[in-house]
Image: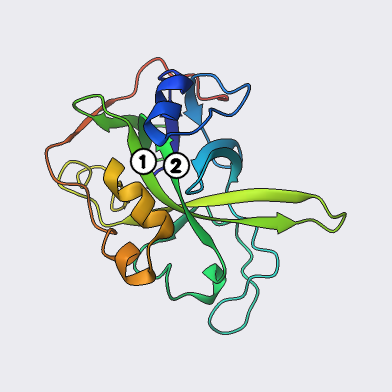
Amino acid sequence: MPGRLFLTRPGAEVAEAFGSDWPEGQGPRANIAPGQQVVVWDGAALRLMRWGMIPVGRVNARGRPVMETIVNARSETVFAKSAFENTRRGVVPCDGWYEWTGKARRKQPWRIAPKDGSLLGFAAIWDVWTAPNGAELAQVATVTCAPNGDVAPIHHRMGVILAPHEWPLWCGGNTSEAQALCHPWPDGRLEVAHAEGVDWSGA
């Protein structure tokens, strides 16, 4: 959807891929959960943002306040919903993500990653929330679409994965150009396996 992310390759390698400096103090992370900071490319630089958009001041189509924190935004509605007005677009780099199947207490975690080991870039939206005390918090939500054939057996959604040459277009293109990028990753490129040896208590 993605449920959690992992980014364990050296930061210098990610920085080189995006042509940007790597955020200071960020090391390999095998378990990145919503509510934590993630590295995001905002179209110009890699920076840290909170994964999950605080909905203060956001309203839905009926004018009612949006109460839940927005972790994932559906690509089918992200360009039309009033809750996403005035957001900007970015890319969340990662090596892969986790999903779960099964019922509570017996859930099976799955690790999804490119078969060729390449760096992934998830489409995302972001903005800056200003707290009552004036403090500013950059916050991000990943954008999702229908699953491809690799992911469909374990989940009904997946993140929109962008090819490296699509990163600038997603961040700086017009709405029509960005919408055209919101489709499942081609079948056969992802490996889905049981997630083993992950410390789920924190990043």
The residue lying toward the viewer, choosing from 59 and 123, is: 123
Instruction: Say which quadrant the C terminus sits in.
Output: top right
| Position in image of residue 82 (x %, y %) | 53, 76
| Residue sticking out furthest to the bottom | 62
Residue 95 to residue 126: above or below: above
Query: 3 above or below 78?
Result: above
Name the residue rendered at 79%, 56% in the picture: 131
- The colour scheme of the drawn protein is rainbow
Give percent across and percent down for residue 148.
19, 49
- Judged left or right of residue 117, residue 22 is right
State the image quarter where residue 153 is shown.
Answer: top left
State the SS at label 2: strand
> Which secondary structure, mark 1?
strand
Locate residue 201 relative to residue 100 in the image: left or right.
Answer: right
Q: Residue furthest top?
A: 197
Indicate the amino acid at tag 1. Answer: Gly
**Residue beneath disc 1:** 121
Asked if residue 36 can be seen in this view, the reply is: yes
Q: Residue at left 47%, top 22%?
A: 11
Provide residue 42's location: percent of width, then percent of height. 51, 48
Q: Tag 1 or tag 2, which sits nearer the N-term?
A: 2
State the image quarter where residue 178 is shown.
Answer: bottom left
Q: Nearer the viewer, residue 98 or 124?
A: 124
Question: What is the quadrant of residue 196 in the picture?
Answer: top left
Q: CA distance from mark 2 to mark 1?
A: 5 Å
Numbered label attached to residue 92: 2
Report the residue at 56% width, 77% height from top: 60
